[in-house]
């Protein structure tokens, strides 16, 4: 990662509990349509690396399962994340990493909304607007440097 100046030089690190979703018999039966739930989405994003630190979003409690809402029938996912500090300059990049991971792992039918949790960032409205604007996301992903940083954050999340 080529992030030179850290905004949060001493983030709180939390103990990670083994929360991996247990496989069900139907997971391996292609004739059964398995509903997607919050735990499955959480498992997809919890190991994303933070852009500033060699830690995961789970270790920093930027994301947690309680702030993920999935409506499988309506094909909708809402993820709220908590930056480590209220003025986190990496909030948009973190949200972009979450979005890319889910674009690559969820069925195309899903609409994904990614938001900074209310009251956790000084520019939450601006960050939320950027993260949910298709044109801005597409433009960001056309930036080779930015895409490289996103891919580095996602490297161990697979």
Image (spheres, grey):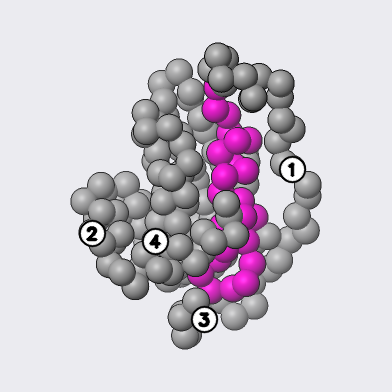
Bin the neighbour count of mark 2 within 10 Å (Cα to Cα): few under 14, some 14-19, many 20 and up: few
Q: CA distance from mark 2 to mark 3?
A: 25 Å
Is disc 1 placed on a helix, strand or loop? loop
Is disc 4 placed on a helix, strand or loop? helix
Q: As drawn, which residue projects farthest toward the bottom?
A: 4
The residue carrying mark 3 is 6
Bin the neighbour count of mark 3 within 10 Å (Cα to Cα): few under 14, some 14-19, many 20 and up: few
User: What label sits on residue 19 in the rendered view?
Assistant: 1
The residue carrying mark 2 is 139
Is disc 3 placed on a helix, strand or loop? loop
Q: Disc 2 or 3, which lies upstream in sequence?
A: 3
Q: Disc 1 or 3, which lies upstream in sequence?
A: 3
Q: Looking at the image, is mark 1 or mark 3 nearer the viewer?
A: 1
Q: Position of residue 8 (x, y in %)?
A: 56, 76
Q: Which residues are magenta?
A: 35-58
Identity of the residue drawn at 58% across and 55% down:
157
Q: Position of residue 107 (x, y in %)?
A: 43, 32
Q: Are marks 4 and 3 in contact (CB under 8 Å)?
A: no
User: Which secondary structure type mostly characterizes the magenta part of the structure?
Assistant: loop
């Amino acid at each position: 990662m080529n992030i030179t100046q850290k905004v949060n030089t001493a983030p709180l690190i939390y103990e990670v509990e083994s929360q991996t979703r247990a496989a069900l018999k139907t997971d391996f039966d292609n004739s059964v349509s398995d509903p997607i739930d919050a735990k499955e989405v959480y498992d997809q994003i919890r190991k994303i690396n933070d852009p500033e630190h060699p830690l995961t979003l789970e270790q920093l409690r930027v994301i947690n399962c309680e702030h993920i809402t999935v409506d499988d029938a309506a094909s909708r996912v809402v993820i709220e994340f908590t930056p480590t500090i209220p003025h986190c300059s990496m909030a948009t990049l973190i949200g972009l990493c979450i979005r890319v991971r889910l674009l690559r792992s969820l069925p195309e039918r899903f609409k994904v909304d990614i938001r900074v949790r209310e009251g956790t960032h000084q520019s939450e409205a601006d960050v939320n607007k950027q993260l949910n604007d298709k044109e801005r996301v597409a433009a960001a992903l056309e930036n080779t440097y930015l895409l490289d940083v996103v891919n580095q954050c996602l490297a161990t999340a697979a």
